[in-house]
Amino acid sequence: MKNEFIKSTLILVVGGAITKLMAMIIKIFLTRSIGDDGIGLYMLIMPTFNLFITLCTMSLPTSISKVIAEGKRGKNVILSLIPISLIYNFILMIILILLSPFIANNLLKNPDTFLGIMGIAFTLPFICLSSILKGYFYGKERMMPFVISNIVEQIIRLLLIVSVVSKLIVYGTKIAVLGVVLINILSELSSIIILIIFLPNKKIKLSDFKFDNTIFKDILNISLNATGSRFIGSISYFLEPIILTFILLRCGYDNSYITQEYGIIMGYVFPLLLIPSFFSMAISTSLLPVVSNSLARGKKEYTKRKLWQAIIISLGVGISFTIIFMLIPDILLKFIYNTNLGTNYVRVIAPFFLMHYIQGPLTAYMQGANMAKEAMMGTLWGMIIKNILLVILSTFIGIWGLIIASLINIFFVTIHHIYRVRELFNISKEDVKTL
């Protein structure tokens, strides 16, 4: 089990590094293709995209991974879920298409976001199917298919941005942003094909795709709690540009200024600071099935050590990157995004983001230890505090209110998770010395 954890983590770290590098290259071409205005517009619709991704996937990778890691079932789990998941996603797709004008005109107060939001609807079934297949490989602790599918997905995305999106900009920014959204269909489709190739060599018949009530209930019990945390976070992210735009417009700020500054923070600053998160995400993905499997066998001490190792590695990587972010933010921003906008934001925010880097392993541990409900409550209170602070602070200090509210949210949720994990497993100084 220990060797599998190390092997899975190494595969995910190396694969995550390659994927992250490719994501940076994609960002370079994307920024040059659609410009600052396009990035600002794209960032305005991203909270809606994120919310509907949460709704369409329903934390299926986490719940499928946990059920399979506990040794209860195999491939029949995903085969029984695919039909009902696709039906659910087609319904969700229709709902989003109908809501697109209202979200663009009444909530975001920017008609140019309409096409991009409507385009999101057509990507949902593909994202859902991809997430179901990934959940199977997580549970089996077979990380290579996941890594290969991610790399292929990024290659397809890069090729489409270079060959298609760069040409769409002549038809206007909103058409180019729509193109950026729709290329997710082909990139996710490529990922699905790769994952299907790696499935066990057993002939799949149409009759295998049948609904299993027992499997559905097991998955749903895990999924609802796990989705709760993601859904709350997605709602908070969805409300963020709506609240910010409403408050700043009332305070006399120009709409173009709001779009540009929000685009800088969410399109340049936060993505840069999130680069080290591929380490913590890799560790978290490997940690979840290990925790589920170990606790099912009563090995609490082993899982405790794995948690501490995950935290220490994530923190060590985070500190190294933080030093670089604080020393040369202008060089990094210029190299990746071809801009110096956001340099001051990066220097101020970077040290506080260390708390974010350890949040992933803590959340994965809580989900594997059947504490998804506690994780959800921490996320819920963090969202409430963040949105209250966003309203108050943005009224007095403008766009900086968004930054301070976001950082306080990160601190609150991380500290909450640390407290809950320590309370249940009584993590002591002696445990740390055994690492």
Image: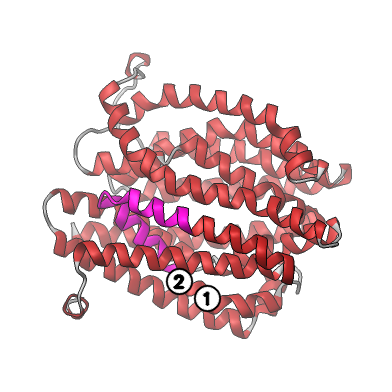
**Residue visible at 29% across and 26% down in the picture:** 202
Coordinates of residue 193 in the picture (x, y in percent): 48, 34
Q: Is residue 221 above or below residue 262?
A: above
- Please state which amino acid type lies under the numbered disc 2: Met
Picture quadrant where residue 53 is located: top right
Q: Mark 2 points at which residue?
A: 355
For the point 40% across and 75% down, the residue is 315
Q: Is mark 1 on a helix, strand or loop?
A: helix
Indicate the quadrant containing the C terminus: top left, top right, bottom left or bottom right.
bottom left
Question: Which residues fall within the magenta stretch?
Answer: 357-381
Q: Mark 1 points at which residue?
A: 352
Q: In front here: 241 or 163?
A: 241
Outermost left residue: 298
Residue nearest the viewer, comparing 405 with 289: 405
Q: Foreground residue, 163 or 349?
A: 349
Q: Does the magenta stretch include residue 274?
A: no
